[in-house]
Amino acid sequence: MRKTILVVWLLLGLAATAGAQSSGTVLLNAAGATFPYPIYSKWFDVYHQQHPNIQINYQSIGSGGGIRQLLAGTVDFGASDGPMSDEQLGQAKFKILHFPTVLGAVVPTYNVAGVASELNFTQKALAGIFLGTITKWNDQEIASANKGISLPGSDIVVVHRSDGSGTSYIWTDFLSKASDDWKTKVGKGTSVNWPVGLGGKGNEGVSGLVKQTPNSIGYIELIYAVQNSISYGMVQNPAGKFVKADLAGVTAAADKASKEIPDDFRVSITNAPGPASYPIASFTWLLIPAQIPDAAKRDAITGFLKWMLNDGQNYNEGLSYSRLPKPVIAKELNAISQIQ
Amino acid sequence: MSTTATTIEHAPPNRDRGGARALIQRLRHGDEVAHLVTLTFAAGILLLTSMLVYELWVNSHLSRAKFGWLFFWTRTWDPIFDNFGASPFIYGTLITSIVSLVIAVPLGIAAAIFLAELAPRKISDSISFLIDLLAAVPSVIYGLLGIFIVVPLMRTTIGPLLINTLGHLPYIGKLFKPPNYGVGFFTAGIVLAIMVVPFIISVSREVLLTVPRDQREAALALGATRWESTWQVVIPWARTGILGSIFLALARALGETMAVTMVIGNDPKITASLLAPGYTIAAVIANEFTEATGDLYLSALIELGLVLFLMTFILNGLARILIVATERGGGHSS
């Protein structure tokens, strides 16, 4: 039965620690976020081919699991879709550094009877729909942004992620900025107490439910929408423009936000300024201990980080991830020296 | 194993306990070895179960300390504001299991009776093979079946039909009210029923086949029809085994995760309507465990695991009591 899941976790923890090293090769164990897993496994594979003595073993067990494993010291570094909270950093026995790796974005997808064109969503409209205060498709807040499209008067069916995920984190982070009500009543996180709606497991679960259920709306990762040719709506950014998400728009958002990025890189870039910025985007981070006593491991990690920030970024578009903006890369390259 | 085979063939082992040679000889005969090996494995089960409970108990202490018994009662599940209550999940787990049994038990037992009593042996054997095959299908496959066939069918046909017919009845009507999204308790119950029915059929059929031929012949000799002999003699004789199959099915329904989470709607609410979306304990653990970051959050999820364990434990206990009771009651009728 599924209670054995706990036992499996225990074994996983053991397996992660049991990574015995043979002489000469450096084996690094890492665990965490699932969202960047495709690009991470590509990077680790290519890097291993270029440096046969360095092998990075990455388990995509989820951001929460990654943070826990890192705090427990069972992995060499972690990965997370949301930055660690001050409370979590306080629990750590060592200092932990955040390194942004790629950018992701989340888009609204919908299925409205008789509407084939792309819909515009104001921030108020999205917050209202997900709070359950806007319940009909022909609500004034939606209709006024979509002049010329006849919207039905039917009830809106909201679909959200049922599993904890970085996608939900980005989405709720955006909604928290879009609406004070959301911020105080629901908040942001990988799982929240959704006021309304059905839960679908994974991007495929949400898009499947939206496709099947008439008059529904959900949110999915941009990558997933692009790879599966799912149409999605435009979202109004703080500059007042309705922006359709694409890889460049996400990088633009990060670029605009980069001036205000703090030294620890724990920053939210939803609702970034600038007319071209797509408002629902986020970094995903590698979590790396500031002190690595094992010199071979330290060199391997810093070497990988440098490669990832330069050559590694060229693999991003191929896998539908947005690349990091140049100022962020420069800042990260500086931060690598903090690893000792 | 060959060790057991040799003990049967050989003379009883030498009981002389004088020295290493005798010990080796005793070991060679296999009795002692077999005893030790089987004992170790049996003890292993006990150890595994107690370790599981221990782990769940220890790791859920934060949540137990904070919420106490209220955990079973409150309805909020809010990871952001660290407020956790298990009642919607307990409710969902029970309701989906009950719905699945209500559908699967009559279906399964009727099919088992046909296969064991009425069908020609050839047909019975080949169908039984297919049923055993069904029992081995991974649950995610049933989940896909649910998403692509049962959910659309519920939304467009079965749901509206139930709302328009049973929905108008007093009392029962409350169970079939809109909204009907296609996903919900009832859909999860149907998918679970499809999953557990092979267990009921397979085990019940085996049990029915073990009923001695004399019993049937005696009933027929007294002038009973074939159906009367089946209903009044064979079924009471096999009652314990059939109940056993039902509880096996219930255990699977309670713990099922993947197929349920794909079709239940994953909304932690307590709603009277069976057509409404809900959530189960196993589903929420599978969904949220990987990304659970807060200590209290994690602890609450583990306590949910403990609650599920407790529910299975209680239901299994009830099953035992029921079986003992019917064994006594069934004694004179067979």
Image (cartoon, coloured by chain):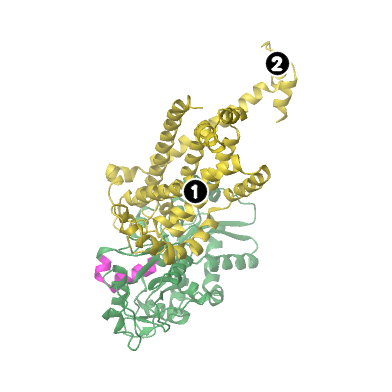
The one of B68 and A109 positioned closer to us in this rendering:
A109
Q: How crowded is mark 1: few (under 14 residues within 10 Å), some or many (20 or more)?
A: some
Q: In this view, does B66 lie above or below A243?
A: above
Quarter of the image that includes the N terminus of chain B: top right
Spatial separation of the CA atoms under disc 1 and disc 2? 46 Å
Tell me what hue chain B is rendered in: yellow
* Residue behind mark 2: B13
Is residue A170 found left or right of A178 in the rendered image? right
Query: Could one spot residue B156 in this view of the protein?
Result: yes
Indicate which disc residue A9 carries. 1
- Magenta stretch? A168-183
| Figure disc tally | 2
The image quadrant that residue A70 belongs to is bottom left
The one of B130 and B71 positioned closer to us in this rendering:
B130
Q: What element carries label 1?
A: helix
Is residue B212 found left or right of B241 in the rendered image? right
Question: What residue is rendered at 63% in x and 50% in y?
Answer: B130
Furthest residue toward bottom: A148
Q: Where is residue B165 in the image (x, y as percent from the top left)?
A: 36, 60
Helix, strand or loop: magenta stretch: helix
Q: Position of residue A261 (x, y in %)?
A: 37, 73
Q: Where is residue A323 in the image (x, y as percent from the top left)?
A: 49, 76
Question: What residue is rendered at 46% in x and 43% in y?
Answer: B250
Name the chain under label 1: A
The image quadrant that residue B33 belongs to is top right
Residue type highlighted by circle 1: Trp
The one of B113 and A52 positioned closer to us in this rendering:
B113
Tell me what hue chain A is rendered in: green
